[in-house]
Image: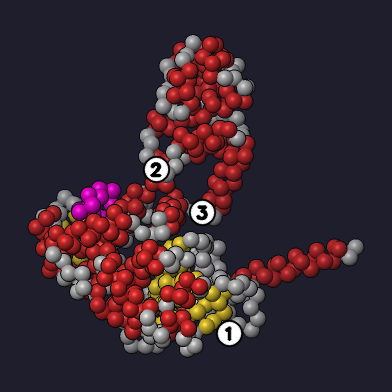
Amino acid sequence: MISDSDVVKLILGFKLRYLRLSKKISYQQLSAETGLSVSYLNDIEKGKKYPKPDKLTSLARVFDLEYDELVSTRTDKRLQPVIELLNSGFFKVFPLNEFGISLEKLIDVFSTSPDRFGAFISTILKMIRSYQIEKEDFFRIALRSYQDMHDNYFPELEAAASQLRTEKGLPSRQPVTYDALADILQKDYDVTIDRVGLSKNKRLRNFRSYYQPAKKVLYLNEGLSEGQELFILCKEIGFHYLKITERPMETLLNKEASFDKLLGNFKASYFAAALIMDAVELVKDIELISRATEWSPDLIGKLLSKYQVTPETLLQRFTNILPHHFGLNDLFFIRLGSTDDLIRYNITKELHLSQLHQPYHTELGEHLCHRWMSISAIKSIKNLKQDYLIDSQISEYWGTNKSYFCITVANSDGNFGEQAGSITLGMLMNEKLRGTFNFMKDPALKKKVVNTTCERCSLADCDNRVAPPRYIEEQNHQAQLEAELGKL
């Protein structure tokens, strides 16, 4: 994170480096003309020092500039996009160090070729404005990229969860209990649990929980499942055990959440899942599943019962374990929500490892393909009197040679403003996957051709289509026009 004063230093350093390089002046030459040492000039360009007015006047004179021109945040048109980015506040809230990026090196790259990088940054900024992408959306995308960089496996969080389990004598083969977790919160962190206060306020019915730090009270709303309660308690323990200070207090994250809060929330959530489902034990469970010669929903159902977790917690935990322990890192995880009419579906959470898989969230307002199990399972559970529906499908992506084995768990209408939804874990069909799970040879596995959205699908006579192939029609129309022009 950088401060306002840091930004001012960086802008001056960026401008000075650009001016020096464009006029082909060496550090030694600039030092001789200004009386400033080479090391001091180097520190200015790196954004480490901000000279006093007399020294700035000397620098401005060398480049035939007025003092105000040199220190102004307005500059050459070619540099302005980079200046706007530095001045936007983005680097104040985005931790480049988490991605192994040095702002100093970034500025160095920008200043060596400002024309190209300025045009590139300008293009990105215009796209962000055109698609109304908020900084919070960018932070969430950045967090997913951070997870992808690490194959969504974090040894330090696994170790922390294992250490706490050992310290408190928590079981790894049986579900952790509410009483044991509440006891840890009370004795170790002086946190009490209130199951009444949040439920009384109808305006707060969409919040599953809220932590009041001044009172050290964790409020739980009514209507939570056992799995939801256990996860919330484990997550609260995670915030304290990991000493995470930048954190959300509520389960429904504020739209203005910073990247640090998103990262803190992710770490506590990861810790919670690892505390509930020990990695060593879950690896054994997945190995047992891998030996099955036929697919059955019970393979997943038994794990939901064993650990007393929600489907989202279980399948998301799979995205930690499968890449690291089984080498299956070509996978995706999506959470889907629906409208009451079951026409519109929206991806409310997603993770793609190794590459951008299908389907994925867009801001284009198009209709997601209804042939995916993620959607068909939601439609099916509407007609069933059960909490969950577990199903699977090999989704063959139209027009490509890619197929995904998808495990989907759909849930009926829930509390907290939720509509019917589904959780899907999709794994790219390749030799590694086929060699890991014996049931991939099961001829009874369902297969279906799928696409991304109806608007971009050329599949003819699709019974699941809910919107015309507008994008395909536009492409065909353009091709026809070009063909007619070619006849002239």
Cβ–Cβ under 8 Å for marks 1 and 3: no
Pointer 3: what residue?
A: 132
Secondary element at tag 1: loop
Residue depicted at 48% across the width and 18% down the height: 38
Residue at 71% across, 67% down: 475
Q: Tell me if residue 442 can be seen.
A: yes
Q: Give the image location of residue 277, x and y in percent.
A: 26, 68
Per the image, the residue denoted by label 1 is: 463
Q: Nearer the viewer, residue 425 or 488?
A: 425
Tell me: 350 left or right of 299: right
Nearer mark to the viewer, of 2 and 3 = 2
Q: Are marks 1 and 2 in contact (CB under 8 Å)?
A: no
Left or right, residue 169 beside residue 477: left
Q: Which residue is mark 2?
A: 97
Q: How is the image coloured?
A: secondary structure
Label 2 neighbour load within 10 Å: few <14, some 14-19, many 20+: few
How far apart are labels 1 and 3 at the CA level? 33 Å
Q: Residues within 10 Å of mark 3 (few under 14, many from 20)?
A: few
Q: Residue shown at 43%/81% (left/top)?
A: 438
